[in-house]
Image (tube, rainbow, N blue to C red):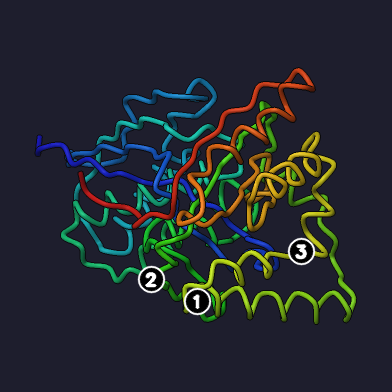
């Protein structure tokens, strides 16, 4: 048996306004921890712990970590297997990339154990393959930032091309997670199949300015550009008190507040130079307290992506 390798795979937020299935952002916390070591053959998941772990399969053909790691071994033609231990720090069905962190962590772990033979884009594709199997659609807006770090944009899925840029240092992030489960498959089923030209123009304008804001470090422009006329409205009914929570965050000083990924988490952006973000977290939590619902919160910032601990 070889020595254990430990990978830190962070939570992510995706979509981010008008960037459905395109934009993603790595978070500094929370994160999953994926450990693995070489064995003679096969993928063996011997331990899963942490929030929601009781519902996660140990079968490597049904587990995001196992599927992604298998894909890396296949692409590199490796002649060994991997024993894996998973510690979840990101609750499943949370909207901050729980399955994405698992998939990215599994792919990155196998990438390290195989001697880092793949390009970063190939590692992202291996993780996205796992998302396709477990979430009902090929999308990389969570696994891309989880692996590459920072703010990521997928220019094209066919051929696949992803770009990562460094977000503003002044960008603070509040995560609020009400006690609701929203499976990704379910949330994708409520989406419209067609959009109007008016909404298309609205989305292109805001998506373009959001990218520019990230590039030049303008948190105010980022906040003004997080607009979604199509996807969040379709999913709003899946998350109780979403609009009340977003309004409370904005009233407390957030530059933007929006549904994270497929939900139910609510993400708020703020300027660290103006506040510490705690009042935003408290304001959103208060909305759920008043409605007798539990809500966990984190005040954090963007992160660097998967790394070996």
Q: Nearer the viewer, mark 1 or mark 3?
A: 3
Q: CA distance from mark 2 to mark 1?
A: 8 Å
In depth, the one of 286 and 205 nearer the eye is 286
Percent across and percent down for residue 185 are 70, 45
The image shows residue 293, relative to residue 140, as above or below, that is: above
User: Which quadrant of the rendered structure holds the C terminus?
Assistant: top left
Q: Quadrant of residue 58?
A: top left
Q: Quadrant of residue 26?
A: bottom left
What is the number of the mark on residue 121? 2
Q: Name the outermost residue toward the front.
A: 274
Percent across and percent down for residue 123 are 36, 63
Q: Tag 1, which secondary structure?
A: strand
In depth, the one of 160 and 180 nearer the eye is 180
User: Which quadrant of the rendered structure holds the N terminus?
Assistant: top left
In depth, the one of 140 and 203 nearer the eye is 203
Mark 1 surroundings within 10 Å by alpha-carbon count, few (fewer than 14), some (14 through 19), many (20 or more): few
The image shows residue 297, relative to residue 51, as above or below, that is: below
Q: Tag 2, which secondary structure?
A: helix
Q: Quadrant of residue 55?
A: top right
Residue that carries the numbered disc 3 in the rendered image: 228
Percent across and percent down for residue 122 are 37, 68
């Amino acid at each position: 048996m070889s020595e254990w390798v430990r990978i830190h795979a962070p939570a992510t937020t995706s979509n981010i306004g008008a960037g459905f299935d395109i934009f993603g952002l790595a978070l500094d916390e929370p994160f999953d921890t994926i450990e693995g070591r070489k064995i003679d053959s096969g993928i063996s998941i011997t331990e899963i712990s942490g929030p929601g772990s009781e519902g996660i399969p140990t079968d490597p053909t049904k587990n995001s970590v196992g599927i992604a790691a298998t894909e890396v071994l296949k692409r590199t033609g490796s002649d060994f297997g991997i024993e894996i231990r998973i510690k979840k720090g990101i609750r499943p069905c949370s909207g901050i990339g729980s399955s994405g962190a698992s998939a990215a962590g599994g792919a990155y772990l196998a990438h390290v154990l195989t001697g880092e033979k793949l390009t970063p884009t190939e590692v992202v594709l291996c993780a996205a393959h796992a998302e396709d199997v477990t979430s009902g659609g090929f999308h990389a807006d969570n696994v891309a930032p989880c692996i590459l770090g920072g703010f990521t944009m997928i220019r094209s899925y066919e051929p696949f091309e992803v770009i990562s840029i460094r977000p503003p240092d002044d960008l603070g992030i509040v995560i609020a997670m009400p006690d609701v489960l929203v499976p990704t498959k379910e949330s994708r089923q409520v989406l419209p199949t067609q959009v109007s030209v008016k909404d298309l123009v609205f989305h292109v304008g805001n998506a373009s300015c959001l990218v520019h804001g990230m590039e030049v470090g303008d948190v105010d422009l980022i906040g003004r550009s997080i607009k979604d006329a199509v996807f969040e409205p379709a999913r709003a009914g899946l998350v109780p008190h979403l609009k009340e929570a977003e309004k409370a965050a904005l009233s407390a000083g957030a530059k933007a507040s929006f549904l994270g990924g497929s939900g139910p988490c609510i993400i708020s952006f703020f300027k660290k130079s103006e506040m510490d973000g705690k009042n935003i977290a408290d304001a959103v939590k208060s909305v759920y307290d008043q409605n007798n619902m539990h809500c966990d919160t984190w005040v954090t910032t963007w992160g660097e992506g998967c790394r070996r601990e």
